[in-house]
Image (cartoon, rainbow, N blue to C red):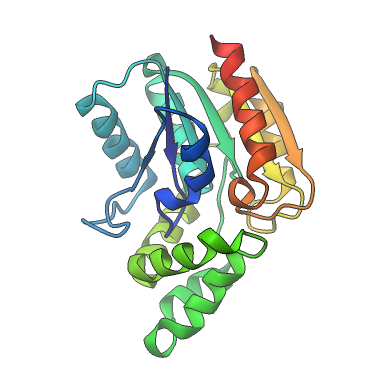
Amino acid sequence: MKLVFVHGAGSSSLAFYYQLRHFRNSKAIDLPGHPTGKACTTIEGYVEWVRGFNTARRYKDVVLCGHSMGGAIAQLYALRYPDELRGIILIGTGARLRVHPDYLNIAKQPGEDNSGWLEGQKGYFEGVDSDIYDVLVRRASEVGPAVELNDLQACDKFDVMEDVHNITLPTQVVCGSEDVMTPVKYSDYLANQIKNAREEIIPGAGHFVQLQKYQQVNVQIERFMATLK
């Protein structure tokens, strides 16, 4: 089995820093534009790009683990190409990802030298260990507000609420109890709609649960992977 991680809007493979260290032979993708290349403008576009990435490397029995926008990509991949996956892990995501106008506005008006926008980015990483915090902030500034805006607009159009029950793959749903961007009710909906889903809410974690409470998240991923063997 090949565990492949897909990051969220305006993010990068660093979002899975602790997972890559823990799971040998796993792969975290940098989506195009994050920060090199040209970003896709739709979730569908990203699905096809990720599929091409997997195919080019001849990955077999892929378990796709997506955070936030990456979770949207994983859901749509599971709906379109279920035969290419062994299972999916959905972290801090939803079947619909309506984006609050405040997030869109700060990406549209990032301030001088993107300073206002960067302060918002730092807020995402509260509670993350200092060894990785500075690297995350630096990478965020390399990706920049224009790419985040592009991704957030793609998320805002994403809606598989009527289709998600058609996912038949084994599914693990994970969410931080304090996640305000994709609150627990989003994960509850996924777990209720997807027949083979199990759900875990991690106490005290926000949207970047896989960085803030990485040990607990790694345990959940490990348990899930064990059920697929």
The quadrant the N terminus occupies is: top left
Residue displayed at 61% across by 59% down: 129
Kindly give the residue lying farthest to the front in the view shown.
Answer: 131
Q: Up-down: is 65 above or below 209?
A: above
Residue 124 appears at what percent x and percent y?
Answer: 59, 64
* Corner quadrant of residue 83: top left
Q: In the image as oriented, which residue stretches furthest toward the right?
A: 203
Asked if one can make out residue 85 in the rendered structure from this viewpoint, the answer is yes
In this view, the residue in front, 117 or 217, is: 217
Where is residue 192 shown, x and y percent of the image? Answer: 71, 28
Residue 179: give x, y in percent of width and height. 70, 54
Left or right, 97 with respect to 28, comes to: right
Q: Residue 30 in the image: state x and y as whole percent.
A: 33, 48
Q: Residue furthest bottom?
A: 112
Picture residue at 64% right of the left edge, 51% below the top: 182
> Is residue 147 or residue 61 the one in the foreground?
61
Q: Quadrant of residue 138?
A: bottom left
Tally of numbered discs: 0
Above or below 16: residue 101 = below
Q: Is residue 163 visible?
A: no
Nearer to me, 160 or 108: 108
Residue furthest out toward the top: 229
Q: Residue at x 56, y 74 (%)?
A: 120
Judge whether 108 appears above or below 204 on screen: below
Check the image and report above or below for 55 versus 18.
Answer: above
183 with respect to 218 (left or right): right
Residue for point 60% across, 45% down: 210
